[in-house]
Amino acid sequence: MFCKSTLITVALALLSAATPLPRDDTSLTTGIRIPLQKRGSLKNADGIFNYEKAVRELVKLKNKHRQNLINLEQNVGRDAFPLGAEIKALVSLPASLLGTGKRGAVPLTDQEDDLEWTGPITIGNPGQTFTIDFDTGSSDLWIPVASCKSCQNHTLYDPSKSSDSKKVNGSFEIQYGDGSSASGGRYNDTVTVGGVTAKSQAFAAVSNESSSFTDDPSDGILGLGFPALSNLNVNPFFFTALEQGAAPEGVFAFKLDQSGSELFIGGTNQSLYTGDVEYHALTSGASGFWQIGGASVSVDGKPLASGFETIIDSGSTIITAPLAAAEAFWAGVPGAKVFDKDQGLWSLPCNSSVEVAFSWGGNAWTINFDDFNAGQTEEGSDDCVGALAGGDLGLGNTTWLLGDTFMKSAYTVFSVDTKAVGFAKLA
């Protein structure tokens, strides 16, 4: 299962791109640690690549960022789009994965190998507890409501049991590539993440749950992106908490690992990293993404691409690059070959010791090969699928998306205060 996470506070200062923040080990930490539960990987328990799970994630990822662009256009206008961004058509699952037959083939033991990092939050007064996927690649909070007939596998929000609950006008709907959608009404209520409480927080209470989420181990999603990406056109939880003075600082951070994972709200947890935090200013402007530019990627120390944009998205697993960039990357990986052209997937030798590293002009952040290896292509094969895919997310041909495959290589810090993303070496 995905491991548990926590978050803390520390003073942040952004001097320039690739600027380290000196540590102050004598200072008190005042942020909040939130345990995150690991919900797995793309590997089955036997080490075989779970093709269906990966394709479903890729489709969900493309449609999530399609919806982000739709939200951005409605909230801010197309002038805020990242360079080259374009709203694409809704992406659908391959016909072979539509319906329930293929899904039934996934062993129940793989329920612990889903694709997200989850932790507890409470909504209401008194609080009702939910298991939530924390997603820096979106901006809304949504959970299933008591009237949802298709949500019985999840904890349901009952507004009648909260003295702070208020139904508000408006609706919420998102479409998915399997032909289903999630929809419902809007509420305001007290939301607490760790010890940080936002009063009268706006969120969506889903009364019709997409089949994409019926068997998902999380009850809902809490977006940690900027307000411009909100489908509800409201302040996301963390921004509400800051506005109300509930969070000690406008900073949160992730440690994602096989154990001891956490989300830290209100600063950084200095016990989880060594040295300084290397910060990079956001290049996303008004678009609302946690996006930084000037990136480069290398394989075994050999530069393969440089000068591209990157969105740091905790709600995804596979690294996704524009197709041409992915092709160029894999051309530089010894023994690599196309695994699935339609889905933009490649394989490489399972016994490879290849070192993939990203840099933004400072340190090189190397991905552990066990994290980059998504599993054998099939039982007995010497080839394993690589966790970097090529695909069009609609975000332009110079933008890569880095999910937890990358985030597990560094302590990752998100600063609303200084509009920056930072990385530090894990302790």
Image: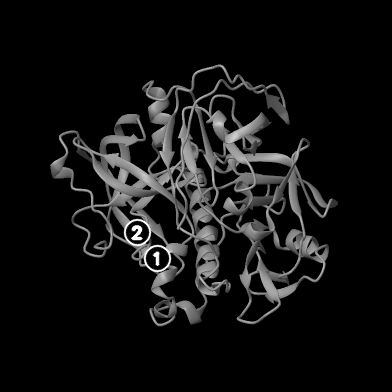
Closest to the observer: 413 or 32? 32
**Mark 1, residue position:** 212
Labelled disc at residue 70: none
**Does dot 2 land on a helix, a strand or a loop?**
strand
The answer to whether 63 is drawn above or below residue 263 in the figure is: below
Q: Position of residue 305 (x, y in %)?
A: 81, 52
Given residues 185 and 310, the one toward you in this image is: 310
Residue at the image point whose x is 54% and y is 72% from the top: 50
Q: Is residue 415 visible?
A: no
Tell me: 40 left or right of 172.
Answer: right
CB within 8 Å, label 1 to label 2: yes
Residue denoted by label 2: 182
On the question of residue 196 being in view, the answer is yes
Q: Residue at x 71, y 54 (%)?
A: 397
Amino acid type, mark 1: Ser
Residue at 60% x, 47% y is 407
- The answer to whether residue 67 is above or below residue 194 is below
Q: How many marks?
A: 2
